[in-house]
Image (tube, grey):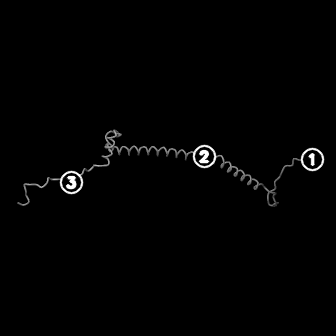
Amino acid sequence: MLGFSPFKKHANKFNYTPRYYDPDLEAFRERRAEKGEQLSDGKGENVYVAGEYIRRRREARNEQRRQDAADRKTRGMIRMLIVIVVVAIVIFVVVPRVAQMFDLAKQNTAVQTAPAEEEFDPYRPIRVVPNDYQGE
């Protein structure tokens, strides 16, 4: 009879191991239960909360953006302060010195263009000056 027997030598056995079983975690929970301690959330350590990871990431991202905006604002204020200081230095130090150089240059050109004693030119028209001398 082709392998059929009404008598079985042993019952069907399955090699089943739980997929999420952690013996260390189970031992830890038993030790805490013996001491009478309650876990922080009362449900266990590895409690899944729907959307918790996404929520934490979003909050961290928003906090980072707020911090970056505050840093940018501070850097902008510092840059503006530096520009104001540089402009003030230019106005109060550089501009008066440049104006002084222009005045000095103007004085030098006035001295250089002063007429020297003219040489006699016989072809030039004679300039007649009235005589205010009154004789005695």
Q: Residues within 10 Å of mark 3 (few under 14, many from 20)?
A: few
Q: How many marks?
A: 3
Q: Tell me the SS state at disc 2.
A: helix
Residue under circle 2?
85
Residue 27 in picture, x, y percent from top left: 31, 46
Q: Tell me the SS state at disc 1.
A: loop
Residue under circle 1?
135
Up-down relation of residue 15 to residue 39 (above or below)? below
Residue 26 in picture, x, y percent from top left: 30, 46
Q: Are marks 1 and 2 in contact (CB under 8 Å)?
A: no
Marker disc for residue 15:
3
Q: CA distance from mark 3 to mark 1?
A: 152 Å
Q: Is residue 106 left or right of residue 30?
A: right
Give, as a three-letter code, the residue at label 1.
Gly
Residue at 92 percent of width and 47 percent of height: 135
Q: Is residue 113 left or right of residue 12?
A: right
Q: Are marks 2 and 3 in contact (CB under 8 Å)?
A: no
Give, as a three-letter code, the residue at label 2.
Val
Q: Which image quadrant: the N terminus?
A: bottom left
- Mark 3 vs mark 1: in front: 3
Residue 88 in picture, x, y percent from top left: 62, 46
Residue sitting at the far right: 136
Residue at 43 percent of width and 43 percent of height: 63
Q: CA distance from mark 2 to mark 3?
A: 81 Å
Q: Looking at the image, which is closer to me, 26 or 124?
A: 26
Residue sitting at the far left: 1
Residue 118 in picture, x, y percent from top left: 81, 58
